[in-house]
Amino acid sequence: MTIDRDIYTLFSMRIDLGSVKKEAKQLEETFDPELSEVEGTTAFQGEIKEISGGYELTGFLDGVYRLNCSRCLEPFTRSFHLPVRLMLKPRPEFNEPERDLAAEELDLVFYDDHIIDIGKILRDEIVVNMPLKPVCDVNCKGLCPQCGQNLNKKDCGCEPGTEAGAWNALKSIKKAIYGGE
Ligand SMILES: [Zn+2]
Ligand SMILES: [Zn+2]
């Protein structure tokens, strides 16, 4: 069944831009972005249409993130609903001056061939929008800086005063590097 899946991945998300006109073409796709941070398949619902100088791809991505909490390091899942609004333009032959990459054009995607892989473009959107410091819960207590206990599960009973502990740790590192006091 691996072969069938490969063919599915290869061809189902390709679009021939030559077939895209000013009248929006509706897109409804379910695909596997093949990211370790995403669980199962992701759905895209949107449209693509021809605009002056290129094409506009708009819609929403719906899926489930599978992330590790940046505080307690435990894995957790969370659904995402990401708006997509991209302009697709043919890649310029020469590097355009930097001013052309102004803020309003950051959602620009260049294509080299009139057959584009929407799956790859949408995968990049998921990556760009991934939370940098995900937390399992806004109230996550994280790990004890002294013994490493997950404080959501139980209290370790370590004395507070972590600042002093961290300061002492810094001092001993400094001592190890520079020697002396
Ligand atoms: Zn957590
Ligand atoms: Zn502790």
Image: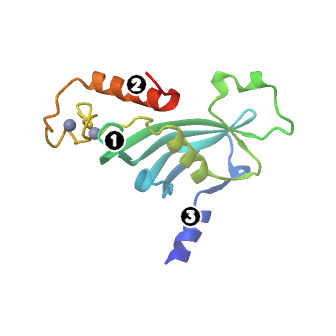
- Residue 103, compared with residue 14, is above or below; it is above
Callout 3: helix, strand or loop?
helix
User: Of the residues shown, which amino acid type is indicated by label 2?
Assistant: Lys
In front of the other: 86 or 3: 3
Residue drawn 44% across and 51% down? 43
The reply to whether residue 35 is visible in this rendering is yes
Q: Which residue is mark 2?
A: 171
The amino acid type found where label 3 is placed reads Thr
Contact flag, marks 1 and 2 (Cβ < 8 Å): no
Instruction: Name the mark nearer the viewer: 1 or 2.
Output: 2
The 10 Å Cα crowd at callout 1, few under 14, some 14 to 19, many 20 or more, is some
Relative to 83, 49 lies left or right: right
Q: Nearer the viewer, residue 81 or 53?
A: 81
Label 2 CB, ligand 2: below 8 Å? Answer: no
Residue holding disc 1: 69
Residue on which disc 3 sits: 9
**Which circle marks residue 42 in the picture?**
none
In the image, the residue with mark 1 has its CB under 8 Å from the nearest atom of ligand 1: yes
- Residue 161 image point, x, y percent: 23, 23
